[in-house]
Image (cartoon, rainbow, N blue to C red):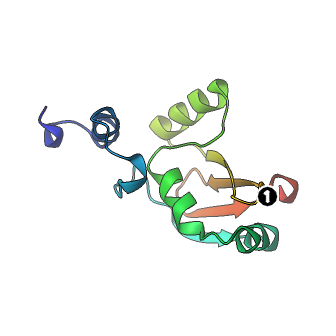
Amino acid sequence: MNIAAVGRESRLRALIKQKTNPMTITETLFRLGRIVATPGALEALARAGQDAKCFLERHASGDWGELDEHNRAENDYSFAHGFRILSSYRTAGGASLWIITEADRSSTCLLLPEDY
């Protein structure tokens, strides 16, 4: 397969299909803009001993985390049509962490669900 000949999303899916570890893929599907975080999200990351970077990379590469099938489909539609994108992850400490990128891709926020 000539990976260079297909779109960015297709390349990501092709790499995963070739059994490449998706966590090593650094290509992003969309820009994150200015990155901000709520104090609660920063505290949860600190308690878990994790950096926001790994979650932001997953989000920007199209790994929506722990979303159900309906919300995954909504994100795929939002990505294709320029709407807001939401991902949900669990930290090593068990906290639920949301990442929301605005429709205009001007900013991305890390927050806890209760911060919304």
In the displayed orientation, state which residue is furthest to the right: 114
Against 86, residue 93 (above or below) is below
Q: Where on the picture, by quarter, is residue 3?
A: top left
Camera-side residue of 106 and 101: 101
Where does the N terminus fall, quadrant-wise? top left
Camera-side residue of 21 and 77: 21
Question: Residue visible at 85% across and 60% down?
Answer: 115
Where does the C terminus fall, quadrant-wise? bottom right
User: 88 left or right of 25?
Assistant: right
Secondary structure, mark 1, is loop
Q: Where on the picture, by quarter, is residue 70?
A: top right
Q: Report x, y in % for residue 5.
A: 14, 38
Q: Report x, y in % for residue 63.
A: 51, 43
Q: Report x, y in % for residue 69.
A: 63, 25
**Residue pointed to by mark 1:** 112
Mark 1 belongs to which amino acid? Answer: Leu
User: 47 left or right of 57?
Assistant: right
Numbered label tally: 1
In the displayed orientation, state which residue is furthest to the left: 2
User: 16 left or right of 115?
Assistant: left
Q: Where on the picture, by quarter, is residue 17?
A: top left
Question: Residue visible at 57% across and 36% down?
Answer: 75
Question: Residue visible at 57% across and 42% down?
Answer: 64
Crowd around label 1: few <14 · some 14–19 · many ≥20 (10 Å): many
Question: Residue visible at 52% across and 62% down?
Answer: 54
Against 95, residue 75 (above or below) is above
